[in-house]
Image (cartoon, helix red, strand yellow):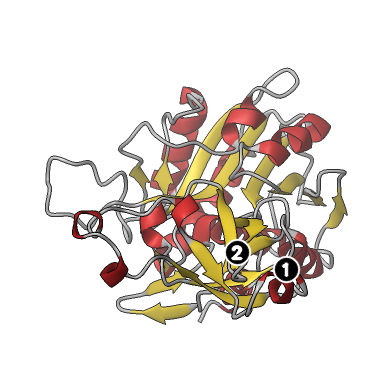
Amino acid sequence: MNKLLSYYTSLFGTSGSEGDIRRAIINEITPHAKARVDALGNIIAFKKGAAEPPAVVMISAHMDEVGLIVTDIADDGTLRFDTVGGIDPRVLCGKHVAVGRGKIPGVIGQVAPHLEKKADRDKVRAVDELYIDVGAKDREDAQSCVSAGDVVGFRSDYAEFGNGLVRAKALDDRVGCEILTELIKTDLPFDTWFVFSVMEEIGCVGAGTAAFQIKPDYSIVVEGTTAADITDDESKSPVCRVGEGPAVSFMDGGTVYDKDFMRLVLDAAGEQAVPHQLKQAVSGGNDSASIQRTASGARAIAISVPVRYLHTPTGVASLSDIENTRRLVLAVLQKLSEI
């Protein structure tokens, strides 16, 4: 069992409220690296390696996860909410959630089908038509434990199942946080900077400010990315496939990745026999977009763990993909030490 990933995914960290996961990561890495927290809440860590660095290298993963935020409390005690990050409303009804600092248990609900008009029963309810039931009898009762502005996280247990798979919430990007933590505990070929960033899901807010402080020459973003590999429509791109290794991006919605750096990554994968794949879509985005354009610029690459059902209360990934992503990042560092 990947105990560290189980621990990290059990913690709540909706964008802007990363305190629980931040404290856990600091406790894990401080025996192995110098770490500090900046004004936005990013963790910036420096790990001594075997030699002086050939260039300034920054490896990052984001701590935050998609979630919800309370916007109002109705007279009947139910909570109105909005999404934090990109969430399809079709995945919400009936899900267990934790509300506010007190982690108040709740369930997301909607109008019962038998109370709807027949023509409306097949419609997907918009977020503003859903509510969170925390068991309150009325508004006053709910206000005793919940306020507008409280963040809401999904409750979803970690479990390993099938042929080396894992299911959990927040695999985007606790897989990256777990990989960076294990790298920090490893002997590295040269001095390396690590960033655990905040608020990626609402616009890649934290990583750019962290990069401005470090001013990297090379940036490696370790992510979880969409795997759409279960489909009966062969005309649709799977983007990447679970179990076939980390996905290396050549372009996404915010970044055209450095071609020379991408070639170095692919060469490192080949030389170390690390299974890998190219991400087969130009879509989405990650912290690379803000890191790449910081200060005088940085050569950027994204190496991602394929995750099914991304941005839902429960994602699915392969334990071998997670390990091979760690191996690939380490191989890239070794390759960079030769430049």
Q: Are marks 2 and 1 in contact (CB under 8 Å)?
A: yes
Circle 2 residues within 10 Å: few <14, some 14–19, many ≥20: many
Q: Spatial distance from mark 2 to mark 1, Cα to Cα? A: 9 Å
Asked which secondary structure carries label 2, the reply is: strand
Q: Quadrant of residue 63?
A: bottom right
Picture coordinates of residue 198, whole percent (x, y): 70, 48
Q: Is residue 330 left or right of residue 195?
A: left
Picture coordinates of residue 232, whole percent (x, y): 12, 54
Which residue is nearer to you in this view: 23 or 127? 127
Picture coordinates of residue 325, whole percent (x, y): 48, 55
Mark 1 highlights which residue?
146
Q: Is residue 110 left or right of residue 194?
A: left
Which residue is nearer to you in this view: 208 or 182? 208
Name the quadrant of the C terminus.
top right
Which residue is nearer to you in this view: 109 or 41? 109
As drawn, 18 above or below 248: below
Residue found 59% across the figure and 40% down from its top: 220
Mark 2 highlights which residue?
79
Picture coordinates of residue 223, whole percent (x, y): 52, 49
Q: Amino acid at mark 2?
A: Leu
